[in-house]
Amino acid sequence: MYRIAVIPGDGIGPEVTAAAREVVDATGLEIEWLECRAGADEAERSGETLPPAVLDVVRQADAALKGPVGTPIGKGFQSVNVRLRRALDLYASLRPVKSLAGVESRFENVDLVIVRENTEGLYAGIENVVVPGVVESLKVVTDRACTRIAEFAFAYARSHGRRQVTAAHKATVMALADGLFLNCAQHVARRYPDIDYEERIIDDLSMNLVLDPAAFDVILLENLYGDIISDLAAGLVGGLGVVPGANIGDGVAVYEAVHGSAPDLAGRGVANPTALVLSAALMLEGLGERSAAERVRAAVESVLRGGRVRTRDLGGSAATGEYVAALVSEIRA
């Protein structure tokens, strides 16, 4: 039996989380779901967006599945997503980006993976006012963080039959900071002679990604570049609503939808759970249940390819429940 922490989140979060759970349960795996509360609604109830008990449950579980969460605006709360990453040292953001038959997009046959360092860079949040009108923001880059994210990217590439890792940088301007990132990636690359390694300046990579995404396989990026490129890549295949995501550390992982909580759609039964369903498949893969993960992915692809059952954002008219029922039927067929 697997023990999975589940954080339903806010807005459409509880609906898409329930959908993902139903799809996972259809695989027949024995799972104990440990429901936790975090986000804007939890802040209204308890005054905490992320109660410490939630972190304890996630640490002790085999994995965590998280719906989109909201953060109260203007009330001094830090993002739940940021707090989770820092508290659990979820240093690797993993974003597989793959075309789905039946989902309209500008490209076909996109199949790449974004690996983003999650803990430092400009997102370290170290800022100060030098003098009135002049603000300094520090980019923190360490050998430890760069090496472990490069190791994650190459190990992932090897274990998933990927052919190449591309490291993105701007060492032409930030010779020391991005230079250290590249030095660490080069050092790790030497231990993976079976994986091709290349380096691209971030603006060149961005342009070529939208010209020919098939030229890329695994893309390794520091925090800010990774944040931007991961969303850009999602746009190549139809948007954040069809892309899974995970934040992974040593011995702990949180699999999540990367889109927002869409409070305007909450309770209407029209939310598209595809992103979280695919994140759940990523979770199953991380647990070593590759067969179950492939069954979930195959169900999503079959239903969307058929075109008869789609949620409104994908050009159909199906309610969330109808779409989930179609997925479950495919899995059990």
Image: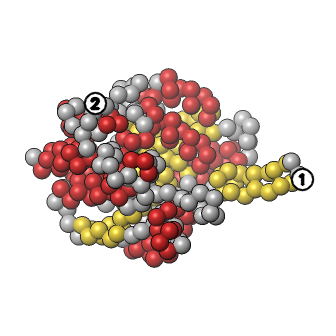
User: What kind of element bears circle 1?
Assistant: strand
Horizontal relation, residue 171 to residue 165: left or right: right
Q: Residue at x 46, y 64 (%)?
A: 41
Tell me which residue sits at (10%, 46%) in the image: 333
Left/right placement of residue 325 relative to residue 184 reads left
Vertical side of 4 occupied by 91: above or below: above
Residue 8's x, y, as percent? 38, 61
In the picture, measured across the screen, residue 192 lies left or right of residue 303, that is right
Residue shown at 23% from the left, 53% from the top = 23
What residue did someone put label 1 on? 131
Secondary structure beneath disc 2?
A: loop
Q: Which mark is residue 102?
A: 2
The residue that appears at 47% across and 68% down in the rendered structure is 42
Give the image location of residue 34, x and y in percent: 33, 71
Compared to 277, does 14 lie above or below? below
Question: To which quarter of the image does residue 256 belong?
Answer: bottom left
Q: Amino acid at mark 1?
A: Val
What is the spatial separation of the Cα atoms under label 1 and label 2, in whole angstroms? 55 Å
Tell me where residue 119 sits by quadrant.
bottom right
What amino acid is labelled 2 in the image?
Gly
Residue 289 in picture, x, y percent from top left: 25, 57
